Amino acid sequence: MNRRDFLACLFWLFISIFVIVQAVKSDIGSLHTPGPGFVPFWSAVVLGVLSLVLGVSANLKREGKQKLIELWKGLEWGKVLSVLFGLFLYPVLLPLVGYLIATFALIIFLLCIGARSKLWVDIASALAIALVSYLIFYTLLDIKLPKGILGL
C-alpha cells in the first residue's frame, strides 16, 4: 500500500466527516427546500466517497515506492502558471467588463491552453458556456451578476 495515498485518504475522510457533522448541525433541509447545510453536506459525502475510493485503490495497488521528485516530472509548469494567471485575472476583470465577457475570455483562454482543438470550436464552446451559465445564474437562480460594459 502506498503510504502517502493512505494518509491522504485518512485526511480527506476526516475532513469530510467533520463537514458532514457541521452541515447536519446547520440544517440540511430537503431536496425541495434545501437548508444552509445542504450543499456542504452532499459535497462532503462525495469527498468521503472519493477518499474511500482512493484508500481502496491505494490498498490494491502494489507499486514500489516513488520518490517525491518523480511525481513532479513531466509537469508543464508554463501551463500551470498560465492557468493560475488566468484565474487570478478573472475576478479583476469581472467588475470591469462584466460577467459575459470575462467568462467568455477565461473559458477561451483555458481551452486554448489545455485543449488541442480548432479555434472555432474553442470560441463556440466558450460562447455556449458563458451564455448557458449566464442564463442559469441570472435568469433561473436570479443571481445579480456584474454588468460591465455590455449592460447585461
Image (cartoon, helix red, strand yellow):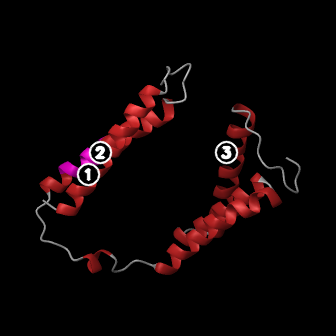
Crowdedness of circle 2 by 10 Å Cα count: few (<14), some, many (20+)? many
Please report contact status of discs 3 and 1: CB closer than 8 Å, yes or no: no
- Residue 92, by quadrant, is bottom right
Compared to 14, does 126 lie above or below? below
Can the viewer see residue 116 in this picture?
Answer: no
**In the rendered image, the vertical position of residue 52 relative to residue 140, given as above or below:** below
User: Crowdedness of circle 1 by 10 Å Cα count: few (<14), some, many (20+)?
Assistant: many
**Spot occupied by residue 23 in the image (x, y as percentages of width and height):** 44, 31
Quadrant assignment for the N terminus: bottom left
Percent position of residue 26, x then y: 49, 27
Residue ID for mark 1:
9
- The part of the chain drawn in magenta is 49-56
Per the image, label 3 sits on a secondary structure element best described as helix
What amino acid type is highlighted by mark number 2? Leu
- For mark 3, does the 10 Å Cα neighbourhood hold few (<14), some (14 to 19), or many (20 or more) residues? some
Residue 138 point in image, percent of width and height: 74, 38
Residue 100 tag number: none
Residue pointed to by mark 3: 133
